[in-house]
């Protein structure tokens, strides 16, 4: 009896030993980075670690701003650096969760400063540095759609029944309906939202599927005629299949920008700034933009970019396009639950 | 006695930390409201809001999918297990291994593979066209979701039933034959009652995870309907409403407990007539 207890005790100790020693041996700073999936060339992490032997990157990915928020605000989270979108940065700033960035530590900031100043939620770049920008638009297959695509209305055209894909996200899909109706994409008016919901329910029989990342593969496959997609994902699809084209409809759409931010409770702020500076370098930025496919607002990268990218209708974002697009705002949980109710009605509606 | 207890310690600790405590946390969030002043009050408001019409229609749909999956799995697995049992034991275990083999690969990977196979431009449709049949939309249909669920959960039905078969003492079958039972009577009066525990375990292992597997509906069904897990995810991740989310989880658990109790009850009831 005693022996088994001793054995159990020794076993327990043996389990604990690796935990404690691994902590003790670590003399490098571990920087916890939370990013979107497929948003950073893994080679660049290695390269940064080689150039900065005192820093080790612990890299994790997520799929939505909301998940990002939940992860980094959950107690005990070790996240230092994350890359939330505009409205989530706004929310984090208003909740006082972000550290002020010391721009002196980021000399490469000068390449993104022009665009950075256009961001209404943080024009002085006090808390955030822009990383990638993009729009939401329509990607279509020129072989299956022979008319010019200029309006969101085409997604309600019965001619394309069963060949349309919508985006499986509350805000993106309802945004499309709101734009078509000419309403503000940040509306909290229940009547406008209900109208948008009705429009989406009416569209449902025409919709092949509500997708996310899979839209890109289905478009490349060539069997889908039209899909709502992010510009970056569309750019990658166009690279693979030259029958595809991308357009931001005339009614306007959503523009988004993802930004590097450092959390207030981060203990490795300086290391995080060094990493941001590394990623803002024009050459690194161009390599990453090529890897990910999203547009970066870096003013000095054209010379490092593959010329084909500069001809891609989804990669290049004209200032004129940006003008008719709007950022999402953080509309608050109460309004969001209105949006959620509308979306649930759409999703549970019979096809 | 003490010896046995000591060996159970790691399991008990594991259970307490990862099952019992979270369970109480869910109950806490579902029934306790924290007022603005910080005091805690018991409330049934969250359960009421979780019982709203649209959430219930989502739950019913998820249960429907799970039920269809369970029935199909049972119908496929039982004859398969019977067949395996009748093979020579060495061949039987090899065939059984072949059934289990796909499980060595991650289930998400296998589901992605099916996505590619069901795609409009690739293998299955090309084969159909080669046969002169019209191309069909296979991916993003309800059928694809059910197919994916059955494919993924079939081994969980087959394994317990096959195990129950291997435990049957073959002299029972000989006895039944000696007493004049034909093959059908032997099956319904002897084999079926003896393999019932395997069936019950199989149903439990398929039905419960099938209710909450939203990935398949997303990948193969194109997210055209909302599954119960999508609902939970939205409550926790998007709306940050842990209370209503937990209330939904509680409703789900209660339904599960009821369905399991019903299954076990039919098991108990049939035992005296089991013919042994």
Image (cartoon, coloured by chain):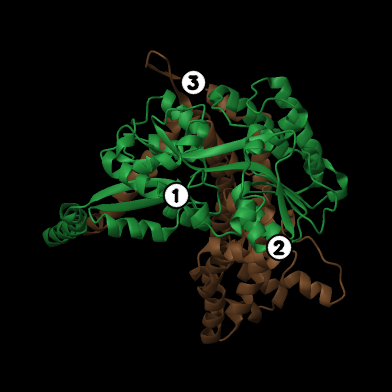
Chain colours: A green, B brown
Query: Of the residues tagged 3 and 1, which is closer to the observer?
Result: 1
For residue B251, the mark is: none
The first of marks 2 and 1 along the sequence is 1
Q: CA distance from mark 2 to mark 1?
A: 27 Å
Q: Residues within 10 Å of mark 2 (few under 14, many from 20)?
A: some
Task: Return the residue at label 2.
Answer: A221
Task: Return the residue at label 3.
Answer: B43
Q: CA distance from mark 3 to mark 1?
A: 37 Å
Instruction: Find residue A275 and report its horizontal and vertical position in percent.
Output: 34, 47
Is B207 in front, or is A274? Answer: A274
Give the position of the C terminus of chain A as an image quadrant: top right
- Quadrant in the picture for residue A143: bottom right
Q: Are marks 3 and 1 on the same chain?
A: no
Q: Are marks 2 and 1 on the same chain?
A: yes
Task: Return the residue at label 1.
Answer: A61
Query: Of the residues tagged 3 and 2, which is closer to the observer?
Result: 2
Position of residue A136 in the picture relative to residue B198 (left or right): right
Q: Chain of mark 3?
A: B
Q: Residues within 10 Å of mark 3 (few under 14, many from 20)?
A: few
Is B155 in front, or is A42? Answer: A42
Instruction: Find residue B130 and report its horizontal and vertical position in percent.
Output: 82, 77
Q: Secondary structure at mark 1?
A: strand
Q: Residue at x 64, y 52 (%)?
A: A234
Q: Residue furthest top?
A: B37
Q: Chain of mark 1?
A: A
Q: Chain of mark 2?
A: A
Q: Residue at x 78, y 39 (%)?
A: A151
Give the position of the N terminus of chain A as an image quadrant: bottom left
Q: Secondary structure at mark 3?
A: loop
A209 vs A341: above or below: below
């Amino acid at each position: 009896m005693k022996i088994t207890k001793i054995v159990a005790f020794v076993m327990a100790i043996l389990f604990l030993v690796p935990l404690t020693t691994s902590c003790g041996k670590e003399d490098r700073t571990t920087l916890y980075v939370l990013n979107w999936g497929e948003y950073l060339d893994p080679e660049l992490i290695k390269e940064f670690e080689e150039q900065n032997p005192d820093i080790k990157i612990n890299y994790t990915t997520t799929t939505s701003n909301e998940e990002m928020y939940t992860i980094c605000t959950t107690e005990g989270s070790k996240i230092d650096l994350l890359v939330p979108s505009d409205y989530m940065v706004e929310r984090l700033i208003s909740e006082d969760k972000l550290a002020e960035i010391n721009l002196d530590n980021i000399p490469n900031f000068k390449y993104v400063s022009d665009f950075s100043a256009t961001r209404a939620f943080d024009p002085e770049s006090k808390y955030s540095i822009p990383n990638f920008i993009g729009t939401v638009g329509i990607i279509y297959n020129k072989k299956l759609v022979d008319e010019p695509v200029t309006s969101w209305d085409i997604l309600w055209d019965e001619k394309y029944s069963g060949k349309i894909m919508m985006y499986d996200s509350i805000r993106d899909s309802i945004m499309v309906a709101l734009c078509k109706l000419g309403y503000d994409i940040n509306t909290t008016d229940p009547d406008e939202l209900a109208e948008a919901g009705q429009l989406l329910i009416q569209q449902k029989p025409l919709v092949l599927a509500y997708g996310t990342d899979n839209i890109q593969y289905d478009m490349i496959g060539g069997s889908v005629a039209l899909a709502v997609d992010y510009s970056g994902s569309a750019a990658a699809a166009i690279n693979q299949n030259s029958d595809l084209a991308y357009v931001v409809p005339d009614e306007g759409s959503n523009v988004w920008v993802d930004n590097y931010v450092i959390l207030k409770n981060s203990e490795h702020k300086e290391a995080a700034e060094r990493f941001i500076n590394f990623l803002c370098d024009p050459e690194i930025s161009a390599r990453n933009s090529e890897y990910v496919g999203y547009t970066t607002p870096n003013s000095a990268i054209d010379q490092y970019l593959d010329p084909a990218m500069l001809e891609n209708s989804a990669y290049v974002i004209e200032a004129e396009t940006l003008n008719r697009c709007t950022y999402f705002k953080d509309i608050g949980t109460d309004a969001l639950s209105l949006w959620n109710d509308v979306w649930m009605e759409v999703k549970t509606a019979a096809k | 006695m003490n010896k046995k207890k000591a060996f159970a310690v790691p399991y008990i600790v594991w259970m307490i930390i990862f099952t019992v405590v979270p369970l109480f946390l869910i109950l806490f969030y579902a029934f306790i409201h924290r007022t603005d002043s910080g005091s805690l009050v018991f409330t049934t408001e969250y359960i009421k809001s979780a019982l709203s019409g649209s959430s219930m229609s989502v739950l019913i749909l998820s249960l429907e999918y799970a039920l269809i999956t369970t029935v199909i799995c049972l119908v496929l697995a039982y004859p398969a297990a019977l067949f395996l049992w009748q093979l020579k034991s060495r061949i039987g275990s090899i065939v059984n291994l072949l059934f289990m083999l796909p499980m060595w690969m991650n289930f998400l990977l296998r589901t992605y593979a099916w996505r590619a196979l069901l795609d409009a431009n690739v293998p299955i449709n090309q084969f159909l066209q080669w046969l002169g049949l019209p191309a069909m939309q296979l991916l993003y249909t309800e059928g694809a979701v059910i197919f994916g669920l059955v494919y993924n959960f079939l081994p969980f039905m087959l394994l317990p039933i096959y195990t129950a078969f291997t435990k049957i003492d073959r002299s029972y079958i000989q006895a039944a034959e000696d007493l004049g039972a034909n093959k059908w009577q032997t099956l319904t009066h002897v084999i079926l009652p003896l393999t019932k525990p395997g069936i019950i375990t199989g149903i439990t292992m398929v039905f419960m995870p099938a209710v909450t597997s939203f990935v398949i509906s997303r990948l193969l069904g194109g997210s055209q309907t909302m599954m119960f897990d999508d609902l939970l995810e939205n409550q926790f991740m998007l709306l940050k409403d842990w209370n209503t989310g937990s209330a939904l989880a509680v409703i789900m658990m209660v339904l599960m407990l009821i369905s399991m109790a019903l299954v076990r009850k039919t098991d108990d009831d049939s035992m005296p007539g089991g013919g042994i």
